[in-house]
Image (tube, coloured by chain):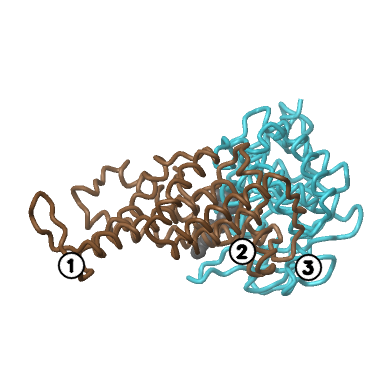
């Protein structure tokens, strides 16, 4: 069984066809802008995500289901921020004062939103950019060695996620319910995952070695077109506006 | 069988061109102490079709891994063009291609096209040459319509053809195939067999690891039978094949079927 997140998904869309350097620059600029923008700026960036998903034919529900633990993390960030940020006046719900501040509520929402947008952005980037293209673009920006490392990391993430998904499926096929035996399930999962992930990583390394994988390789030439220019200007505009608002 | 450590002459078929690849007294001891290969010596030339057969666990896959430098011998050595392979395994892998027993382990590309391009790109070939090879191999193995499909979505047989294609695109001088017929249906086996015989005709070597002698024997020049990590029999296929039954392989009945009939090629 394959996990549904952080996998390249071949489709014929404009996003898939964009120059990988453009996609990578937009991802980096958007991530930076995301952490610099506040309030209304963030509000402007949020609607860009569904637009991006639609353009790449990526189902948000699948991401949501597959990356559920990451979304739980975002919820945790929100709760911690909201309850642990000192400030006044306290927010009231149905007339009851809650032990959280308005400032904490806003900060928590902003940080959770940032995390959610980053998850969707990274997923969208990997969905529409094959690993070979990621390597090409990274090699343009950071050199061949860094690009190879980046490609290997991007190749291993889905492998590890798949390993996790396979073990969970195998455990549930053999009648182990996490709901009823959470500790036993966790222990079995962790030990199986560690062993299998190591074996999978070493087999992948062998497969790469057997095919002469190295940082010196032929790189397909870039062929930027008008769509790339439009994408660059559009995203630069949105990102600049999000920072100025 | 000679005891461990004793030097054996490198066995090879004596006819034809020079020896490209050779294992010389190769032994492999696992970390726990178990012996996986014991004093294995064999030499291989291009343009030869060699079958390596043997029961489960006899060391065929381990030998294949040594032949492409993925495992290093505890004693003995692997020679490429007469020179021992030390650190530069890259040169070895340019000349000797390995199709893994488990296709899933081998596929690293995220689409069929990317998988086929992967090897030639690593060889730093020019873009036009890569495209030529990719389209040639896709046509040869019937993968043209699957160009954009991710390998994880392919059937077992399609994955197997893709794994073979990925290595073929690197145009190795000797192709080692570990159980390539697993998961293949009848047309799939015929297709792969055709490719292998064409490779032999184009002066490339084929080392085929298989249990299924009845599908392929007729094409073999030489048959090596492995047993418990050693080469038990090695010789011309016609002469060695009648001994297969002694080593846990399906016995071949040469009284009712001639040597040339042991093939699935129509
Ligand atoms: N890490 C290890 N430690 C000890 N023994 C091992 C280890 N790895 C493999 N073996 C053993 O080495 C032997 C040779 O394995 P190999 O995979 O080469 O067999 P094979 O001939 O390819 O079998 P099959 O036909 O089933 O593919 C097997 O008996 C196997 O159990
Ligand atoms: Mg094997």
Give above or below for A112 relative to A128: below
Instruction: Please name which of the two marks, 3 or 2, marks the residue nearer to the observer.
Output: 3
Give the spatial CA distance, label 3 vs label 2: 17 Å
Q: Looking at this view, is A75 or A162 the one in front? A: A75
Residue picked out by circle 2 = B37
Q: Residue beneath label 1, please?
A: A88
Numbered circle sitting on residue B79: 3
* Label 1, label 2: how far apart the Cα atoms are: 75 Å
The quarter of the image holding the N terminus of chain A is: top left
- Per the rendering, the colour in which chain B appears is cyan
* Image position, residue B63 (x, y; %): 65, 59
**Mark 1 and mark 3 residues within 8 Å of each other at the beta carbon:** no
| Residue found 68% across the figure and 61% down from its top | A213
| Pick the front one: A210 or B242 | A210
Q: Position of residue B69 (x, y in %)?
A: 69, 65
Quadrant assignment for ligand 1: bottom right
The spot of residue A14 in percent (x, y) is 63, 40
> Which SS class for mark 3?
strand
Tag 1's secondary structure? loop
Q: In screen coordinates, is B213 left or right of B19?
A: left
Q: Residues within 10 Å of mark 3 (few under 14, many from 20)?
A: some
Whether labels 1 and 3 belong to a single chain: the reply is no
Neighbours of disc 2 within 10 Å: few (<14), some (14-19), many (20+) = many
Is residue A133 rendered to the left or right of residue A169? right
């Amino acid at each position: 069984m394959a996990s549904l997140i952080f996998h390249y998904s071949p489709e014929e869309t404009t996003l898939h066809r964009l120059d990988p350097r453009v996609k990578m620059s937009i991802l980096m600029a958007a991530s930076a802008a995301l952490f610099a923008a506040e309030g209304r700026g963030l509000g402007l960036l949020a609607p860009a995500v569904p637009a991006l998903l639609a353009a790449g034919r990526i189902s948000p529900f699948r991401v949501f289901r597959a990356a559920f633990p990451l979304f739980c993390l975002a919820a945790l960030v929100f709760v911690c921020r909201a309850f642990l940020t000192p400030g006044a006046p306290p927010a009231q719900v149905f007339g009851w004062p809650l032990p959280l501040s308005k400032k904490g509520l806003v900060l928590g929402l902003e940080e959770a939103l940032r995390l959610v947008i980053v998850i969707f952005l990274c997923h969208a980037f990997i969905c529409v950019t094959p690993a070979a293209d990621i390597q090409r673009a990274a090699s343009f920006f950071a050199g061949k060695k860094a690009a190879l490392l980046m490609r290997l990391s991007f190749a291993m993430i889905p492998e590890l996620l798949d390993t996790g998904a396979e073990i969970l499926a195998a455990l549930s096929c053999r009648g182990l319910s996490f709901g009823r035996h959470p500790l036993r399930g966790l222990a079995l999962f962790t030990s199986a995952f560690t062993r299998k992930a190591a074996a999978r990583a070493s087999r992948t390394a062998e497969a790469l070695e057997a095919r002469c994988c190295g940082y010196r390789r032929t790189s397909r030439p870039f062929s930027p077109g008008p769509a790339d220019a439009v994408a660059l200007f559009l995203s630069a505009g949105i990102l600049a506006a999000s920072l100025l608002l | 069988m000679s005891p461990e450590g004793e030097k054996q002459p490198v066995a090879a078929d004596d006819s034809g061109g020079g020896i490209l690849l050779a294992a010389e007294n190769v032994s492999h001891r696992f970390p726990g102490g178990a012996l996986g290969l014991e004093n294995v010596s064999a030499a291989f030339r291009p343009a030869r079709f060699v079958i390596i057969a043997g029961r489960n666990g006899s060391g065929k896959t381990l030998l294949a891994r040594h032949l492409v430098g993925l495992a290093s011998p505890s004693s003995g050595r692997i020679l490429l063009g007469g020179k021992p392979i030390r650190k530069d395994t890259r040169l070895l892998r340019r000349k000797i291609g390995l199709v893994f027993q488990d296709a899933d382990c081998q596929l690293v590309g995220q689409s069929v096209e990317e998988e086929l391009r992967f090897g030639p790109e690593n060889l730093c070939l020019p873009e036009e040459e890569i495209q030529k090879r990719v389209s040639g191999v896709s046509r040869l193995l019937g993968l043209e319509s699957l160009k954009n499909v991710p390998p994880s979505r392919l059937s077992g047989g399609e994955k197997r053809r893709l794994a073979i294609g990925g290595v073929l695109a690197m145009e190795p001088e000797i192709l080692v195939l570990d159980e390539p017929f697993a998961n293949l249906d009848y047309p799939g086996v015929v297709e792969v067999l055709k490719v292998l015989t064409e490779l032999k005709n184009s002066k490339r070597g084929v080392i085929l690891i298989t249990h299924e002698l009845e599908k392929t024997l007729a094409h073999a020049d030489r048959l090596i039978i492995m047993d418990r990590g050693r080469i038990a029999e090695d010789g011309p296929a016609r002469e060695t094949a009648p001994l297969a039954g002694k080593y846990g392989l399906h016995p071949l009945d040469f009284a009712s079927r001639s040597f040339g009939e042991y093939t699935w090629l129509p």
